[in-house]
Amino acid sequence: MVKSFHQRLAELYTLNKARELTRAEMDEFNHCLLQNAKFVHEIAYLENLSLMASMTHDVDWQHEICMEIDMLTMDPHAVKTKKPDSHK
């Protein structure tokens, strides 16, 4: 799923190929880059948790994590950095 910030980042990149971005557009570009970094970090974090759950054979925990990954990737605006509850 393409997130709204990915789409806007592509638009701003394309604009910048034709002309310099305005100050407001540069601020928006930087905001999109920040959102992208948060999204990538969150996905990596959840994938690492999923690997840990798999290695410990905790199927229920792994299903919970996979649901979080699905929700994060399906929500077009989501970047929901959330720390896990104390597990077990």
Image (spheres, rainbow, N blue to C red):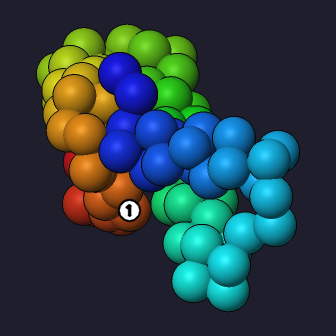
Q: Is residue 85 left or right of residue 36?
A: left
Image quarter hosting the N terminus: top left
Give the residue at mark 1.
Answer: 81
For the residue carrying disc 1, how many other residues have a C-alpha within 10 Å: few (<14), some (14-19), or many (20+)?
some
| Vertical side of 6 occupied by 78: above or below | below
Residue 54 horizontal/vertical position (percent): 44, 15
The outermost residue toward the bottom is: 23
Check disc 1 and report its element: helix, strand or loop: loop
Residue drawn 36% across the image and 55% down it: 79
Asked whether the viewer can see residue 56, the reply is: no
Residue drawn 28% across the image and 50% down it: 78
Residue drawn 22% across the image and 28% down it: 74
| Vertical side of 43 occupied by 39: above or below | below
Count of marks overlaid on the render: 1
Q: Which of 40 and 7 is in front in this view?
A: 7
Asked whether the viewer can see residue 8, the reply is: yes
Residue 44 horizontal/vertical position (percent): 58, 37
Q: Nearer the viewer, residue 47 or 19?
A: 19
Q: Which of 18 and 41 is in front in this view?
A: 18
Q: Nearer the viewer, residue 44 or 85?
A: 44
Residue drawn 38% across the image and 38% down it: 3
Residue 25 horizontal/vertical position (percent): 60, 73
Image quadrant of residue 23? Answer: bottom right
The outermost residue toward the front is: 18
Q: Is residue 54 left or right of residue 84?
A: right
| Type of amino acid under label 1 | Thr
Residue 8 horizontal/vertical position (percent): 48, 49
Image quadrant of residue 65? Answer: top left
